[in-house]
């Protein structure tokens, strides 16, 4: 069984999750368009606290593919997931 925790907010929280054996730690990354998104700098700090073998997961709600590419390139997640939101 894989344990996944998403929307981790800070490095201390990430370190605690690694310490208890969480397999995947995810952050919601963006430019503030959606609530709870972390900016790139904060996401980098969280991921720095995630040590192997724990996997780093980048989550994005952006519809901007260039922004998603920038996020992936800058924070270097193990995996990334994007849900292209449809706004009405």
Image: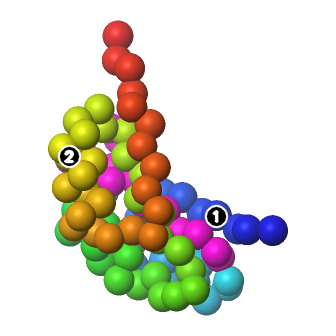
Segment colored magenta: 22-37
- Residue 62 drawn in magenta: no
The residue that disc 2 covers is: 67
Residue that mark 1 sits on: 4
Which element type, helix, strand or loop, lies under badge 2? helix
Total marks in image = 2
Q: Is residue 82 visible?
A: yes
In the rendered view, would you say 13 is above or below 9?
Answer: below
Say left or right for 46 vs 24.
Answer: left
The residue sitting at 25% across, 40% down in the picture is: 65
Q: Position of residue 41 (x, y in %)?
A: 20, 68
Q: Position of residue 38 (x, y in %)?
A: 30, 57
Q: Residue at x 38, y 20 (%)?
A: 86
Residue 29 lies in the magenta stretch: yes
Name the residue rendered at 81%, 68% in the picture: 1
| Distance between mark 2 and mark 1 Cα atoms | 24 Å
């Amino acid at each position: 069984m894989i344990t996944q925790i998403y929307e981790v907010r800070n490095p201390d929280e990430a370190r605690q999750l690694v310490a208890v054996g969480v397999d995947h730690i995810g952050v919601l990354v963006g430019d503030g368009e959606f609530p709870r998104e972390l900016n790139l700098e904060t996401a980098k700090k969280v991921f720095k606290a995630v040590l192997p073998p724990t996997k780093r997961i980048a989550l994005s709600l952006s519809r901007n593919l260039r922004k998603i590419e920038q996020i992936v390139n800058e924070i270097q997640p193990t995996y990334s997931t994007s849900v292209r939101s449809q706004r009405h």
